[in-house]
Image (cartoon, helix red, strand yellow):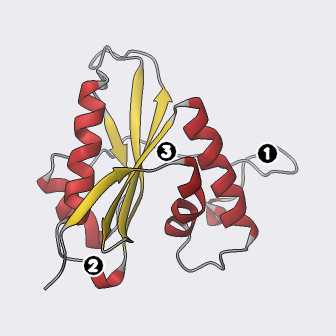
Amino acid sequence: MPSAWTMRPTTFADASTVAQHRYPETDVHAEPVRVYATWVAEAMERGTYLGWFVEESGRVAAGLGLTLLEWGPTKTDPSPTRARVVNVFTVLDYRQRGFAAALLKRAISEARARGIGTLSLGTTDQARSLYTRLGFRPYEAEMVCKLHASTGEPAPASLI
């Protein structure tokens, strides 16, 4: 019988684990993981990254982050801040137990408490139904332009 699970905020000491969740197929010592872990710790210090872990039997079973973005008020949302849900991850052995939903509800509650009226996220086909059940809707009006790191020029669509 599984033990009871708990949810806790992430701390600076968790930045590497958050980065591993972000890049689960990448070696823990690889540059993208190290760079992301540094960014997470710095964003936590600035107060622009909030995160939570679900733990069971002392093991991190799932995690989720919320990046706070200075966006500016819009016609439909007077809040100057938006939130982006990131790093939603559940360890394979713990999937289908409601951890991601619990974490997402916690993030929505935190956004509400801070007066944030708009949350966004990227999704996969696998997670789309969860996000839909919790109130997220497709928003197809966005586009993206990636700039080459070396030239600053727009990158070809194949690199996006």
- Viewer-side residue, 19 vs 12: 12
- Viewer-side residue, 36 vs 120: 36
Q: Secondary structure at mark 2?
A: helix
Q: Position of residue 41 (x, y in %)?
A: 62, 46
User: In this rendering, is residue 98 above or below 143?
Assistant: below
The amino acid type found where label 2 is placed reads Tyr
Residue 112: tell me if it is visible.
Answer: yes
Q: Quadrant of residue 133?
A: bottom left
**Label placed on residue 143:** 3
Residue at 37% over, 77% down? 91
Q: Position of residue 148 (x, y in %)?
A: 78, 52
Residue at 37% over, 41% down? 141
Residue at 26% over, 19% down? 76
Q: Quadrant of residue 110?
A: top left
Label 2: which residue?
Answer: 94
Q: Quadrant of the C terminus?
A: bottom right
Residue 137: tell me if it is visible.
Answer: no
Could you tell which of marks 2 and 3 lies nearer the N-terminus?
A: 2
Residue at 45% over, 50% down? 10
Q: CA distance from mark 3 to mark 1?
A: 16 Å
Number of on-image labels: 3
Mark 3 burial class by Cα count in 10 Å: few <14, some 14-19, many 20+: few
Label 1: which residue?
Answer: 153
Could you tell which of marks 3 and 1 lies nearer the N-terminus?
A: 3
